[in-house]
Image (cartoon, rainbow, N blue to C red):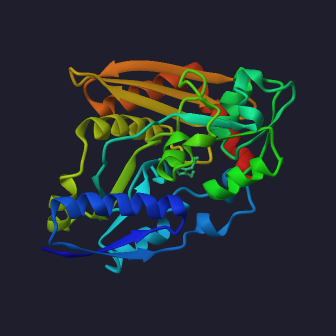
Amino acid sequence: MGNWKVGTRRSNLALTQTNWVVDQLKGLAPEADFELHEIVTKGDRILDVTLSKVGGKGLFVKEIEQSLFDKETDFAVHSCKDMPSELPEGLVIGAIPKRVDPRDVLLSKDGKTLDELPEGALVGTSSLRRSAQILAHRPDIQIESLRGNIDTRVRKLEEGNFDAIILAAAGLERVNFEGEIAQFLPVEISLPAVGQGALAIECRADDKEMLALLKRIDHEPTRRAVTAERSFLHKLQGGCQVPIGAYATVAEDNLITLTGMVGSPDGKQLFKNTATGNDPLALGIQVAEALLAQGAGEVLEQVLRENQQ
Ligand SMILES: NCc1[nH]cc(CCC(=O)O)c1CC(=O)O
């Protein structure tokens, strides 16, 4: 039943994730057919500029969403953290499979941990969220921009351009680079990006047959956690260009505990709040409002002003 066209980015990580999803679906619907369509996004094309300066939300998803609207594809596999907090009218997230490790990790010369890095060490990351939190923990560290696919970033570390780099555990795990990890950063030090470690499968809102198939690989606790994180992000109007982090877990009683963070890129100001609740949307808004009450709004406005310059 069904002949599905699948939109995917072309990177090793994107293809690995897409193939993983297709394998899951084939296991559930052996008679279905899947055809991969590789799509190059703006975020893939512009590699020489710091992400926060490229501007615009959804850098890695726009062209893929267009192909869904045009019916060139039927569903698309994204890293959840690359998805803007609001989807265009007519598209929905049909499934969020079980999340893998959400943490950030440090890769370094000689396997040094964050605390073992020498005074003034050079750390590569283009994420304001990561730089804010690293600098809050180690103000002596020098941060330098680092973009590109996982392979490119690891190569730049190996070529000696940095003392350490920071990446997502999930991406490394998926492309079998875990061996390179020097340290899993505790979420108390580096709160992950919203949705980090989870996949989001997007499709047309009116495609009933597609939705019925995707529902079978949806993981309810992950969806609840990620929905709370995305509600938090949406309330703060954030994208990948602002220093915002969030991480939610779901306990056995189904209650969600969400921690949210807003920081200044220099790490001198870091606002955090944790709350527990049953309704993911309300919980996200509650944690966002707690941060705004602490003064996080001014920090976010400052970052947005600087990005526009
Ligand atoms: N921003 C790019 C991106 N999008 C998703 C992942 C990793 C996989 C994930 O978090 O699900 C990465 C690489 C990274 O941040 O290290």
Residue depicted at x 57% and y 48%: 177
Residue depicted at x 40% and y 45%: 198
- Near-viewer residue (39 or 297): 39
Count of labels in the image: 0
**Based on the displayed image, in which of its 4 quarters is residue 245 positioned?**
top right
Q: Is residue 269 above or below residue 60?
A: above
- Near-viewer residue (250 or 164): 164
Q: Position of residue 293 (x, y in %)?
A: 53, 21
Residue depicted at x 79% and y 24%: 139
**Based on the displayed image, in which of its 4 quarters is residue 231 positioned?**
top left
Q: Is residue 218 visible?
A: yes
In this rendering, would 35 be left or right of 60? left
Location of the N terminus by quadrant is bottom left
Q: Is residue 73 above or below residue 233?
A: below
Q: Residue furthest left?
A: 1
Q: Residue furthest right?
A: 120
Q: Position of residue 40 (x, y in %)?
A: 54, 73
Q: Position of residue 51 (x, y in %)?
A: 67, 54
Q: Is residue 77 visible?
A: no
Q: Position of residue 227 (x, y in %)?
A: 34, 39
**Based on the displayed image, in which of its 4 quarters is residue 69 positioned?**
bottom left
